[in-house]
Amino acid sequence: MEAFGKSQSVRRTEDLRFLTGHGRYVDDIAPTDALHAVFLRSPVAHAEIGGLDVEGARAAPGVHLVLTAADLEAAGVKLGMKSSRVENRDGSKGAGPLRPVLAKGRVRFVGEPIAMIVADTLTQAKDAAELIEPDFDTLDAHMELAPGGPALHPEEAPDNLAYDWELGDVEAVETAFGAAAHRVSLRVVHNRIIANSMEPRGAFAEWDGRRLHLSVNGQGVWTQKSQLAAALGMAEDDVRVTNPDVGGGFGMKGMAYPEYVPIAQAARMLGRPVRWMSERTEAMLSDNAGRDLVATAELAFDADYRITAYRVHVLSNLGAYNSQFAQAIQSRLFSKVLTGLYDIPLAWLNAQGVYTNTVQVDAYRGAGRPEAIYTLERLMDHAARELGIDPWELRRRNFITPGAFPYRTASGELYDVGEFARVMDRVRIEADVDGFAARRAASEAQGKLRGLGLCTYIESILGDPSEDAAVEFNSDGTVALYVGTQSNGQGHETVYAQFLADRTGIPFDAIRVVQGDSDLIAKGGGTGGSRSVTVQSVATDAAVSRMITAFTPFLADELGVDAQALRFDEGAFRAEGSNRTPTLLEAAELARARGREDLLRHEAEVTLPGRSYPNGAHVAEVEIDAETGELRLDRYTVTDDFGNILHPMLAEGQVHGGVAQGFGQAVTENAVHDETGQLLSASFMDYAMPRADDLPMFGFSTEPVPSTANPLGMKGCGEAGTVGALAAIANAVHDALEPVGAGPLDMPYTPNRLWAAIEHARQRTA
């Protein structure tokens, strides 16, 4: 593939329309005659529904339809939503309680949809919703992250335990711990996060009498298509799902949600388009949350401080029901990078999930990998302090060495390549670690605490390893590239067109990337797990190879040369004995003139032979005002190994966004409930998002080691920033607090939490 490796940061083609207000989001493109849907949501966290009188709402001005769970069931709609379930330690399946699209018999979290009202205007729908007064028999809420308490699903999970999963040889690990020269343990809390995508969730549905069309701002169309067809009892061919421009997803928009089924059913019943757009507080109450777990981790070391065993117990909050991927995230996905970059021969993970009266928890940027790396890297820093060894040296001593690859981890992953010490050495230089002592002294002279934190991380590319691509030549001289992934702001339209242009010589400006339409490409894996650019580019490369193979005999006949002599090189077909060098666009024009329609579209499906494993090192420097607890992130440096990179600027931008979200969780963000299940942080007055002035300029460099797990040598970059940021910032905080004897502390490191810890340490030593 001669053209690969240009790695040019061409200007993003999407930005012109986004920055000038011409993005076409789901609420922009809804039909002008669409009716408006509003959802009546539960104001209480746990209650039996004694009665639900909706007749007043049905008679309200402008109302066309009110749907409840009973109405949906009467129409033959399946209420239950699909979810993954892991295997318990005893071989049984994790709990699988019904999660209805509209509450049936009981509500289990504040914000759960109970009924949907469809009216001519949004105001009329809201007014009608206020006429519905459910008769609630309130139950005690289970808010503790622990089994037991009031049962949410008495038949499926009487003790609120959703699953009890394990990986590894517990007896061998216990033996290693018994023989260890040193043992270190740490308990860490991963605070709950609300994704807060810039564009809240929304959708509209249309029915033409035979086919259903759902337009939704998601991260792919095929999951929605199959689940919607199953719920409505329709053939999948009769359901079309589209994704327009999407204003952020971060994993939260990667799965089906309850609202889309009644919206679609309403359009089918009324024969009119129906639209819905979530408001911000509604989104905070109903979007799947992220993280929310407690991990207790232990490391065993020999006398030379080499790790001999690792064991972890994870207790995670699933919320009130299983969301689509939830059970797998803090179990299987956590385990993908359980042992990080370290040569750990034995490991054991026990992961348990608990139901509570809160909104569901599912994928949020990194989905299990940030949680696993944060747990391990916090423990490594803690171990270095306990054992009296430099944290950089402790890591270096335990890295998997380059000669050990391919390396099978204790959790079963096959790492293909890695030069972890090289990456760490580079970030040490880039972060000017040798100058830290002088910067700390300057901070101390001003009465402030300064700390430096390191995180060395690895993550696993997840999601479907298969993907489709199709290249179609249009009569106007342009080319359509159909892809199975879905951009939510990553720049896919640019990088995919750039890759196709580099591979074929087709002008970049002539390529239009088509995504998010289940009618236009047979299937696709959507976007998630940092898979998109890697797997989609491999699929595009395969489609190009098929295209060149298909054109070769046709052009050989046209040029009067032997097909074996014809080659494709630098954007054109060439052969000795002919002075003609047709480009692919010229070849397509000729094929069209000859009636060879079969040469105008080329498709390929690929399956990656293995996962790739992006890795890197993050260094954070923080300064804390000991009198107020205010934290300032003063310096932040990243060195990553993403293998071969197609568009360096986009890769760096992904890291910037991931670090910003990691900072948010580490320092400002926290979803807080009271004991009754009310969300106390349901607006931006109470939920603190990171802001631009919270962050310094980031230093970014790469030390690429091309992956052998795909033909392009690529590794994903979409979630890496978040995976590395949490522990780097947390370790910097603890380094700053060490001189005053404060810690360990859990995220978020708010001024109040830091000030209280510093004051407590001062009083303890006074």
Image (tube, grey):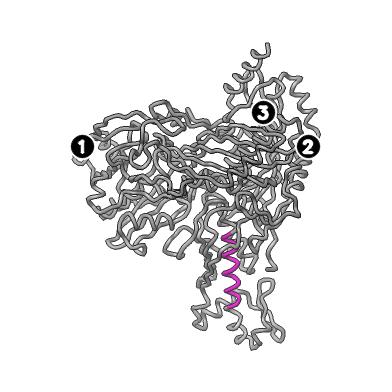
**Neighbours of disc 1 within 10 Å: few (<14), some (14-19), many (20+):** few
Disc 2 or disc 3, which is closer to the eye?
A: 3
N-terminal of the pair, mark 2 or mark 1, is 1
Image-based side of 359 in relation to 730, left or right: left
| Circle 1: element type | loop
Residue bearing mark 1: 53
Residue type at numbered disc 1: Asp
Q: Which mark is residue 433?
A: none
Q: Report the Cα–Cα distance between label 3 and label 1.
A: 55 Å
Residue 154 vs 488, above or below: the answer is above
Q: Residue furthest top?
A: 766
The answer to the question of whether label 2 and label 1 lie on touching residues, with beta carbons closer than 8 A, is: no
Q: Is residue 65 left or right of residue 254?
A: left
Q: Amino acid at mark 2?
A: Asp
Front in this rendered view, residue 123 or 764 = 764
Secondary structure of the residue carrying numbered label 2: loop
Task: Please give the range of residues in magenta.
Answer: 535-549
Residue at horizontal 72 percent and vertical 18 percent from the top: 447
Question: In which quadrant of the rendered view does residue 148 lie?
Answer: top left
